[in-house]
Image (tube, rainbow, N blue to C red):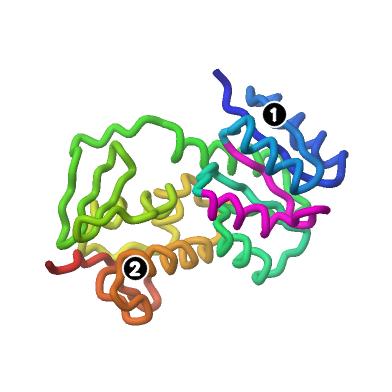
Amino acid sequence: MSPRILVVDDEEVIVRLVSFNLEKEGFETLAAYDGREALDIIRREHPDLVVLDVMLPELDGFSLCRLLRQEKILIPVLMLTAKDEEIDKVLGLEMGADDYLTKPFSPRELVARVRAILRRTKEPRDDQIDRMELGDLEIFPSRYEVRRGGRELDLTSREFELLLLFCQNKGIVMSREQILEKVWGYDFYGDARVVDVHIRHLREKIEDDPGNPLCIKTVRGVGYKFQPPER
């Protein structure tokens, strides 16, 4: 069964363009033209991914994304913004978006982003280890589950992928570009600031003091290094 993508934009021409290019690549599409309609469709149809415009009537893209995460609806979101401004991109990520595209964008880039997100969230995991224990963290790769001190952590799929990557490369300094390629599945299209925002969110969930992290350390001018927390 082909993945179903919900395309949300108040401009019909954009919805048609995005839907056409996705369907040409074998995806099924659904359409919504405002945030409220999109929320109803998501709750009812459970699409595999949402292509979400920021500027929407009734309920804007930022608010819709925040609502989804508050309701524990972890469907991946690729956010569209008409402005090439960092504040819009970062705000989208803060609200729980997995990635973003700035209008105008090429159909090739759109499809590449969609495929990359779905590849990371939908393909079965082939990890040989069912359980990893690092300090006070327990990680269950096949279940996308993480526990700290016996308490399950509420991680998004992207945060889980980041943590798993760090655990598999503990003590190794990794550049933002390396992390982007391994977790997001692309390099040429990527923006390294995406990595910084998601790492900050991950720190808030696994660090005692996110402002002074002991597990995920910043290596200035290079990237990040993971040191397992001590019991």
Q: What residue sits 56% from the left and 60% below the top? A: 191
| Pick the front one: 225 or 5 | 5
Is 95 positioned to the left or the right of 217 in the image?
A: right
Q: Is residue 168 above or below residue 94?
A: above
Say what secondary structure mark 1 lies in: strand
- Residue labelled with disc 1: 29
Q: What residue sits 32% from the left and 81% below the top? A: 212
Q: Is residue 130 above or below residue 97?
A: above
Per the rendering, the mark at residue 93 is: none
Do the residues bearing badges 1 and 2 touch, measured as CB atoms within 8 Å? no
The spot of residue 33 in percent (x, y) is: 81, 42
Quadrant occupied by the N terminus: top right
How many numbered discs?
A: 2
Quadrant occupied by the C terminus: bottom left
The spot of residue 16 in percent (x, y) is: 82, 34
| Pick the front one: 183 or 55 | 55
Q: Is residue 54 magenta?
A: yes
Say what secondary structure mark 2 lies in: strand
Q: What residue sits 53% from the left and 66% below the top? A: 193
Amino acid type of the residue tagged 1 in the rendering = Thr
Span colored in magenta: 49-71
- Residue labelled with disc 2: 224
Q: What residue sits 24% from the left and 49% below the top? A: 139
- Disc 1 packing (10 Å; few <14; some 14–19; many ≥20): many
